[in-house]
Image (spheres, rainbow, N blue to C red):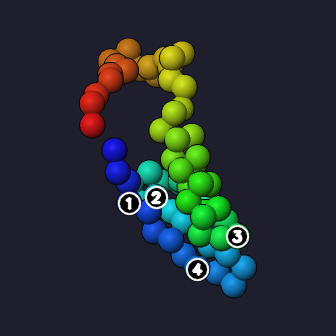
Amino acid sequence: MQIKIVVHKEAEGFWAEVPSIPGCVSQGDTMEELLVNIQEAIEGCLGVDVENLVPMGADDKVLTIAI
């Protein structure tokens, strides 16, 4: 899977966001550090444990889809 990120340059390093995963951001002092950190952030965002997810309403369902 390939995911696009937006990299922002700051005075003291870089930060990146993942537009397809709202709230998934990270930073690094160097571009190399940023790339490692944003990959870990993406894995964390996509790896949320939903084993014990309980639907809130009687008509709600938990489904698994392939992307």
For label 4, count other residues whose C-alpha is less than 10 Å away and answer few (under 14), some (14-19) or many (20+). few
SS for callout 4: strand
Residue 12, percent across and down? 72, 79
Quarter of the image that includes the C terminus: top left
Residue assigned mark 4:
9
Q: CA distance from mark 3 to mark 4?
A: 10 Å
For label 1, count other residues whose C-alpha is less than 10 Å away and answer few (under 14), some (14-19) or many (20+). few
SS for callout 1: loop
**First in sequence: mark 3 or mark 4?**
4
Question: What amino acid is labelled 1 in the image?
Answer: Lys
- Are the residues flagged by discs 2 and 1 in contact, CB closer than 8 Å? yes
- Tell us which disc is closer to us: 2 or 1: 1
Q: CA distance from mark 3 to mark 1?
A: 20 Å
Q: Give left or right: position of 22 versus 61.
A: right
**First in sequence: mark 3 or mark 1?**
1
For label 2, count other residues whose C-alpha is less than 10 Å away and answer few (under 14), some (14-19) or many (20+). some
For label 3, count other residues whose C-alpha is less than 10 Å away and answer few (under 14), some (14-19) or many (20+). some
Question: What amino acid is labelled 4 in the image?
Answer: Lys
Residue assigned mark 1:
4
Q: CA distance from mark 4 to mark 1?
A: 16 Å
SS for callout 3: loop
Residue depicted at x 52% and y 41%: 43
Question: What amino acid is labelled 3 in the image?
Answer: Asp
Above or below residue 21? Residue 49 is above
